[in-house]
Amino acid sequence: MGFLVDTQKEGGGHSWGYVRSLVRRKQVDSANGISHGHQLAKALTVPHLVAIGVGATIGAGVYILVGTVAREHSGPSLALSFLIAGIAAGLSAFCYAELSSRCPSAGSAYHYSYICVGEGVAWIIGWALILEYTIGGSAVARGISPNLALIFGGEDGLPAILARHQIPGLDVVVDPCAAILVFVVTGLLCMGIKESTFAQGIVTAVNVCVLVFVIVAGSYLGFKTGWAGYELSTGFFPFGVDGMFAGSATVFFAFIGFDSVASTAEEVRNPQRDLPIGIGLALLLCCSLYMMVSIVIVGLIPYYAMDPDTPISSAFASHDMQWAVYLITLGAVMALCSALMGALLPQPRILMAMARDGLLPSIFSDINKRTQVPVKATVATGLCAATLAFFMDVSQLAGMVSVGTLLAFTMVAVSVLILRYVPPDEQPLPSSLQESVDSVSFIGGETTSSGHVGTSDSSHQPLIDNNDALVDVPLIKNQEALGCWVLSEENRRTVAGWSIMFTCIGAFLLSYSASSLSFPGLIRYPLCGVGGCLLLAGLIALSSIDQDDARHTFGHSGGYMCPFVPLLPIICILINMYLLVNLGSATWARVSVWLLIGVIVYVFYGRKNSSLADAVYVTTAHAEEIYREHEGSLA
């Protein structure tokens, strides 16, 4: 039985060395990651994870989105828009739940992409997530001071030291309150994961209580006044069913935040059980609150009469409940503070994971001995976010946050398909074990002139592998008699790899052509047809072949398994690609600049310093034998 060895060095041409570096993959919980320094504290349980997920998801968006989406898209059908968006987000949550329980290490989507796809894609995802969390945290911090001022009596209610000021001669409005709040949250995060999560839980609880008040008091007013918002001549779908779906695409971004739960996977006491439960409960609670609030608010006041900036407050004010406005404003402030914690919590862990893998300077991977958190990475995150929040109004850059999230969601879904059909069956070993690799004799191995065992070029391809497999002949005969499609293991992996690739290409072509209304019909409709055919062909092929047996033992076995594979991940890929394409050219132009900087950093630093730069790759089945040989030689 053949096996695979690959030194991943740059032999065979300089350009081929670049390609090799882009597709090299690491193993789950690789020794070169967690062995450096101290481990993160194993302190989180399900209640902590729910607090993180709900806190990061329910920001001030719910206090604003209800009015904007109801006025422009959904009307009284707003609750259905939230339900559809929640289901779409739930597809990604299913994928996150499986990968986080199988690969419970810091880094979230970056970590999963590195294991399943390759270093190049993982770098792009990690670099995009850094942008997402920095801008997201800054945008949230800038939104706190205006809401805080309302509690103290209006725009001029804050003390001068906290109020916004315009720098003379420059078109720059500084926000000291935002920067101070970022520093406070950074200090909390440096104290320890349990302490910061406890604080976030308190803030989140206050926000949830305010939303429950809105639901209860609003329901009382609705039954008292006759639900005027639902008794309109325009009906339940004033903008049609298309408007409802357009509204769901807008409110989809109100559900992103559960990926913060996945980023803390390494700090969870029982990740196989607690992570899926935490992600699922957080999303279910958020969706329920969003729907109940929207049902109440659009019933209290006609959708066209809603204030787009303060829909909930104005709805209560129109029923002579001015005192409720202060309570709702307090809820908005608490929601923003909780969202700020949720935005700043994952980034240090992304930086730490990338530094562990050698793609960023090792200073970011240092873990404080006392608090067991990456303090240096947390401080760096806080400084960047505070500087941005102090000097810039980053609301116009908010679309860039969505790019990082949707790219991560897409790659997580792709990673689930790879894990199920073509899981990596080779394992990187340190170059120090090269002598042990050379000295071990394997059946079917073909020795090269350098003393290494023969390799297959397919080892460099993240989706397609061509390892030999023994086949049970009687089983083939029985299955052929039943009329089943039988493939050898080699061909099955090849078909699965190409099918996943065609599925992704088809989803992109279909999303792009369906969204490009300015395209002439002669180009647009054929593109739609080609994309749809590729997507359908990939789905049919994956549904027709068996999943890999290694899926049961890959990573930490015994955790959650995503249902309805391959259909569910493919739908998830299609939805996320459609939303990515529709973010607009201005957003993509800004993001492209950041990604270009990332490519330069990777080429000149990350690629050369990667912990896998000199790794030796062997099949997982033979890795233990090599380790035993190495230990024997040392003895």
Image (cartoon, rainbow, N blue to C red):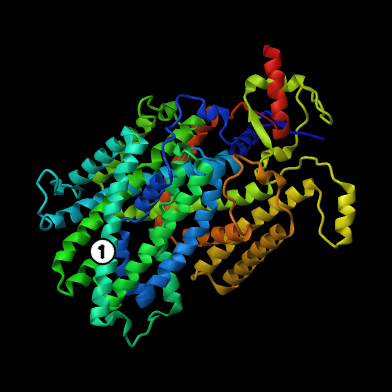
Left or right of 440, for residue 183:
left
Q: Nearer the viewer, residue 172 or 207?
A: 207
Q: Quadrant of residue 520?
A: bottom right
Total count of labels = 1
* Residue at 67% from the left image edge and 38% from the top image edge: 460
Left or right of 383, for residue 52:
right
Determine whether 330 is above or below 324 in the image: above
Q: Quadrant of residue 396?
A: bottom left
Determine whether 290 is above or below 428 in the image: below
Check the picture and name the quadrant holding the C terminus: top right
* Residue at 71% from the left image edge and 48% from the top image edge: 548
- The image position of residue 45, as x and y in percent, is 43, 43
Q: Tell me if mark 1 has few (under 14), some (14-19) or many (20+) residues whose alpha carbon lies within 10 angstroms of its own.
A: some
Check the picture and name the quadrant holding the N terminus: top right
- The image position of residue 257, as x and y in percent, is 40, 52
Identity of the residue furthest to the top in this view: 635
Q: Amino acid at mark 1?
A: Phe
**Residue tagged 1:** 213
Determine whether 450 is above or below 54 in the image: above
Q: Is residue 240 visible?
A: yes
Q: Is residue 435 visible?
A: no
- The image position of residue 76, as x and y in percent, is 35, 77
Left or right of 88, for residue 486:
right
* Residue at 49% from the left image edge and 62% from the top image edge: 88
Q: Nearer the viewer, residue 372 or 608?
A: 372
- The image position of residue 341, as x and y in percent, is 32, 45
Secondary structure state at the residue bearing disc 1: helix
Q: Nearer the viewer, residue 234 or 14?
A: 234
